Image (cartoon, rainbow, N blue to C red):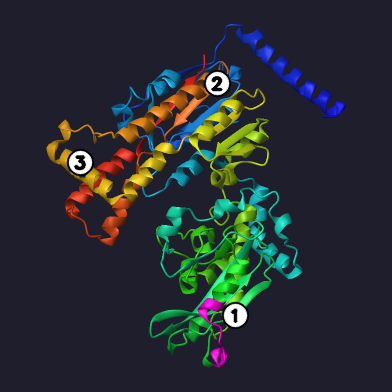
Amino acid sequence: MSSQEQKSEGATLEKENKESSNFFDIYGPQAKAEIVFKTPETNSTLNLQDVQGLVTWVLADGFMPSWVFIKNKPLIPKVVMLYVPGLDAALYLAQSKTLSSFKQSCGNPRALLALSCVSDGMQTIDALLTCKVKRKRNVIDSVRDAGQSAEKERSNSLIDSAEFLKDIPFPVTYYTLTAKDLEDNGYCLNQPDFVSTLPAPGGSSLYEILALDCEMCITSEGFELTRVTLVDIKGQVVLDKLVKPSNPITDYNTRFSGITYEMLSGVTTSLQDVQEDFLKLVHKDTILVGHSLENDLLALKIYHDLIIDTSVLYKHPRGGSYKTALRVLAKRFLSREIQQSGTGHDSIEDARAAMDLALLKIRNGPDFGSPPSFMRRKLLTLLGECGKTTSFIDDISIVKRYASESSHAIPVCSDDEALLKARKEVKNDRVHFVWTQFSELNSYFRKQVEDDVKLNGKLAEMISLLTCNKKPANRKGAKYNVSTELKEILTRIDARVRSLHAALPTNSMFIICTGHGDIAIVHRLRKMLTEQSETMVPRAKLVKVLEELQAQAEVALCFVGMKH
């Protein structure tokens, strides 16, 4: 370290110590930061935004929360937020003795309304770690002009991958589909006749992001691939091949595919040939962009899970499963007419449009294209702009999505590693906000529903409970038959909470947010009912069990305490 850097660092520490001293001069040497919970209104429940609002009130320019009062707020040196998905109110109450460190660290919990069980855990994290802020007028104007500038950049070839990915509001991976998104939108998983993309030789792909579009014709066996196109971030074609279907063609589907008899005459490239070419360009870490790519990947018979789907990215005004056509999005946001030739679609044109639509979102943020009064920003970015240093400790996929450029981004692979890193960061006087997650309980629930024997046992237990407790007055929610394995997991979580709390400096705020209960079993039962899967349980009883488990999973908990 240079002498100049040492002087600068010394000055910063002197300033921080002086400020701290000033606080104690005002409040007194024995002063403590304290939390006073206001009496909750009848039927009132906290939501995830309330929890986030507490953080921004203590560390940034947020508004005073209505549900809690902070005494001597300037004395709080840091806020530590621990996310423990899977722990709902029913499980905590049933195992409060095993989880005694939660109450010892933070006192009694407050009920927290989780997101609907239709969502997944990633959306809960998103609600905690992204903020809605008012969009400034000049930002609104720039977003309105973004579509026109995209076309200009395309013609001048100004877009460079490395340059483009600098200074963007959220990382590119933020816009990729989650595992639940893939399932909900019909992406094929674990098909025996599919091939999967592979890790890049040498560790990194030639292309970080590519756009895909395919054209299909109708054969005696259904839709089959006839053309595949890949374009890069500049819109330059890196792959464009016609493919001969393996079965006799019954309809060239020209009005949509643009493919004719003459175009395929003499073509010998098979599906296997084009799969080999595709896999040389698209690797496991390549982000694939397109519009409803589940259809393209189905025709290619390729499995890839790093997807930006513009049909999902740009929400349809009616919501739900509705999707806006690519030509409509291109006209609205790119001022570009596509699919208007009268001779069918052009896969190069469609791939470029999908790429440009994705780039607009990436450049302008996830709320581009929605009503312009608000925009989403990372919580950690807002804290950084208020002069606060943050440490973000989580799985690498979550770190990539939510850590800001100024954060200490620390990817971990286990709860024990998360605890080790978190204990170190909370002791760092320069760090004001620490986020980490203990995910062992949630992982356990996900594994349980994959085991049919254990799932049937859980269903039988629930039906028995519901049968014995038909009268609502006698019911206090589902009771847990806690297995030895689950008991051990809860014991380990409790020990980690105790260890993390012990490492906190005096007057630190400790927030434990559980987010949701066991949503894995809810998703599994919903799928069984939707697909009308064969089961030993009558459908009516299955619906009752689902209602009970969903209601239970949507009552999460929030613990807030001060370290004294």
The magenta stretch spans which residues? 262-273
Inspect this view and state whether residue 111 appears: no
Viewer-closest of 60 and 547: 547
Viewer-closest of 264 and 343: 264
Pointer 3 local density, CA inside 10 Å: few below 14, some 14–19, many at least 20? some
Q: CA distance from mark 2 to mark 1?
A: 60 Å
Q: Upstream in the sequence, badge 2 or badge 1?
A: 1
Q: Name the spot of residue 222 as percent of width and height, x first.
A: 39, 80
Residue under circle 1? 241
Q: Which mark is residue 111?
A: none
Tell me the residue at 29%/41% (across/down): 551
Q: At label 1, which amino acid type do we have?
A: Lys
User: Which secondary structure, mark 2?
Assistant: helix
Q: Name the spot of residue 194 as percent of width and height, x first.
A: 46, 68
Inspect this view and state whether residue 208 appears: yes
Tell me the residue at 79%/21% (across/down): 10
Q: At label 3, which amino acid type do we have?
A: Glu
Residue under circle 3? 461
Q: At label 2, which amino acid type do we have?
A: Ala
Q: Upstream in the sequence, badge 3 or badge 2?
A: 3
Residue under circle 2? 503
Q: Name the spot of residue 136 as percent of width and height, x first.
A: 64, 45
